[in-house]
Amino acid sequence: MLAEAPRPLTSEMMALRIFSPFAYPLPRMARIVPVVMGEADRLSASFPLVWRRTATGAELVVLRTLMEDGTGFAPGMARALALLPLLLQAYPLTLRPDGGADAAPGPRLMIDTAVADEPSDAGAPIATVEGRMSRGAELRIRALQLFERDLARTRDLSNALARRGLLEPWPLAFDLGGGRRCDIQGLLVVPPASFDTPAFGPVMEEFGVAAAKLIGLHRLSLFRTGQLLAMARAASAKVVAA
């Protein structure tokens, strides 16, 4: 799902050493990351929780920064493990996209073989010589299990909102100063006007309190966009000054 050079996690790969997610470029720089409903509480207080248009429907995502180079985070947030989405907590372990009914056979668990360019320690093997998973690997697999367990419910609710016209485009285009711009397309939000209508009735009937909670968190999380813009402009100013 999130990988630069993914390979199936076979027995031959178990001796590979893995490092903190922040040792790898992708978790440090990932701007938009797929998430599931179970992590919405944890992430929505810090980042906009929105949707992204995909070939198979609407995908719930978190917008971590407006920048593409790993900058633009508020102080203390860039390398806070607690603020990493589950897919990034699990990195470099990842899941093969399921592909729906056309999915290829085989295990979904994979590893991104991208190079750790900023390791802070010696890391640890995925499994010991005795064949036991290391503690780091166990925690990553647990994060993937939590993500996968909630994925179908999240997709169903997201696509129900899309089918009922309860998601609209949310283009982000900002002047960051110094000749730099932010232009992000393909994101979706719940139309503000819909909150004053009975449009959510059928969705609430189908998904219950989980839908109400997610939509409420989504609405409140949009206020974080202002902070993202301020941080992006500050990061851009530093580049210009340098």
Image (cartoon, grey):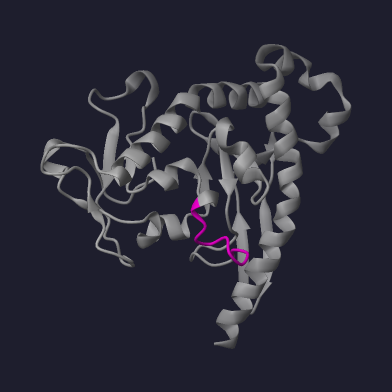
Q: Which residue is drawn at 70% across and 16% down?
A: 208
Residue found at the far bottom of this picture = 242
- The answer to whether one can see residue 187 in this image is no
Percent x, y for residue 217? 71, 37
Q: In this view, does 157 lie above or below 228?
A: above
Q: Which residue is drawn at 27% across and 50% down?
A: 5
Q: In which quarter of the image is residue 8?
A: top left
Which residue occupies the foreground of this view, 149 or 131? 131
136 left or right of 37 in image: left
Percent x, y for residue 81? 49, 53
Q: In this view, does 206 lie above or below 144?
A: above
Residue 96 in magenta stretch: no
| Residue bounds of the magenta highlight | 73-81
Residue 77 in magenta stretch: yes
Predominant SS of the magenta segment:
loop
Q: In this view, does 22 lie above or below 181?
A: above
Q: In which quarter of the image is residue 115?
A: bottom left
51 left or right of 166 in image: left
- The answer to whether one can see residue 87 in this image is yes
Q: Is residue 56 above or below residue 50?
A: above
